[in-house]
Image (tube, coloured by chain):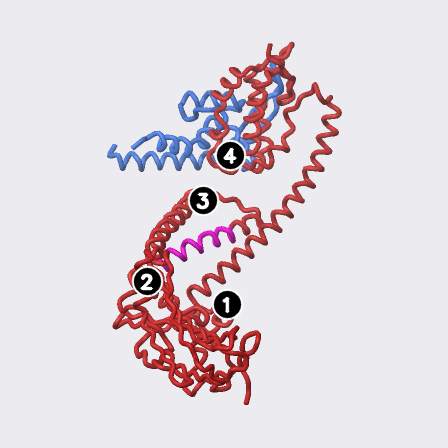
Chain colours: A red, B blue
Amino acid sequence: MKKTISINIAGQIFKIDEDAFDRLKSYLDQITASFSREPGGEETISDIETRIAEIFGGGQEPPVVVTNEMISEMIKIMGAPEDYSEENASKGNPQHVSQRKNIYNPNSLNARAGRVFSTFWKSVGGFLYLIFRILMISVGSALALLGFVTLFSFVATFFFNGTPLVKDLFEPDILNLNGLLSIVLNSASVLPVIILTAIVVIIPLGVLTYLGIVMVFNLKNNSKIASIVIFSVWVASVAVLGVILSAKLSVYGNHKSVSARIELKPAPDTIYLAPQRKLSDLQGFEKSGIERICFYKSKEYSTVCGSPEVDIIPSDSTISYITIEKKASGKSDFEAYANVRNIDYTYRFSGKTLYADEFYAVRPGENWNGSEVAVRIYAREGTVIKCLPGFDPKNYGLMSTDRKPPVYKVSKEGFEEITY
Amino acid sequence: MNTDNTQAQMRKGILEYCILAVLSRNSCYAIDIINELKKAQVIVVEGTLYPLLTRQKNAGLLSYRWEESPQGPPRKYYELTEEGKKYLVELDSAWEELVTSVNQIRGR
């Protein structure tokens, strides 16, 4: 035999099957959620409950036993919760479901206890709602601030980098974003990638900011279609960007390097650094880069050039030597090695002087393929390294003060710039 | 193209007008209004009516009084207020214009 419990609907007592009770409670909770925040919503709910009690045949002795079939019949007459009003159904707020008190089980609480509990729950509910709102405002403010600041930073660095005001505000210092992308992508892909990246980043940040504002001001969001459209655009952008980048970035799958070594015998007390081919030779090249890593691209010949890196390292033996390492990537090891061989970088050591180009170039017509050139000077402790006039250490990634030409001295830990 | 949605929208648009029209004859219990609307096939489920009655009452178009029921709790009997009556006259006029316009477009 099914277990029944007693309930009160609109002031009338009914018996109800346990499984039917859950269904009825769910139905009434949805109605309450739909109308509780509407002006006069409590009255609407009360009218609906009165009508439901009437449909169930309330007011009889002994009380009517409400079954699942009766609930189905009632829903057929009254309509499903979403039928009550399209507008109200979309404004449902589940947080009010727990505040519902019209339905209860007198077997567990007598009427007086119920009223006391009801009053108590109203106070507690109000207090909890206050806490909830404070929490929402705090979290919403944090989200809105985070979203806005990040969005502003992204837009500033992505679109306005290099402008006088923004230039000194943000790190890293990106120079000529279009040019930088054209180093790794073909020219036709640059604009679509910029647009897609902007969509992929701006939409979530914008949504984050909007959600924060909604939470702070307790706004209602009814624009489901707009949300679906925005989400669809974002997913499509992510997919297209992913396809483009994965196709382009597969070039960097395999990384290889080749080194050359120049022994300095006998180890000189002083090593001079002099430029060979200079950046000023790159006429008509456009500069781009992040921080000190710079690239130069000729539109006319479609040649990409990059800056080499020179480092001074204390030698752990009595000898001094120089290594020149060329690195490049490719879709396969073979291609990576081919790209290494195709790096155009010249140098020579003559007497006590290292002559090294200020730039290297990849094969004309190709994008940057992960190529790098590193020149490492391994010198005994105490060795003096002098930059000859025309050798600008900044173009080789070497630290220096404004004093020209700089002079370095190799120490145990590394090297330091010295003054004569 | 499915006409169900269009028909539903049309019914929804005239529902409030129909409620006022029903109440213009005499004061009614909610079930009486529902029966009238169901008979005219303007409403399908009863639940739609209650929020509209509350809204119209809050707008000052309707008022209600309690009357004892032979069984169960007392019932609300709704009736038009003076404001509701004026509002209905305006809606009657608007409806006439609308019907004329639509008929004109349909060539009748």
Q: Quadrant of residue A345?
A: bottom left
- Give x and y (percent) for residue A373: 39, 70
Whole-percent x and y of residue A118? 71, 30
As drawn, is A307 to the left or to the right of A303?
Answer: right
- Would you say residue A373 sits in the magenta stretch? no
Q: Are marks 3 and 4 on the same chain?
A: no
Nearest to viewer (mark 3 / mark 2): 2
Answer yes or no: are tags 4 and 1 on the same subunit: no
Q: Nearer the viewer, residue B28 or A134?
A: A134
Amino acid type, label 2: Tyr
Residue at mark 4: B84
Which secondary structure lies at badge 4? helix
Q: Amino acid at mark 3?
A: Ser
Q: Is residue A82 above or below residue B67?
A: below
Closer to us: A234 or B83: A234
Task: Give the mark toward the camera: 2 or 4.
Answer: 2
The residue drawn where x is 34% and y is 76% is: A346
Determine the chain carrying the residue at label 3: A
Q: Position of residue A73 (x, y in %)?
A: 49, 17
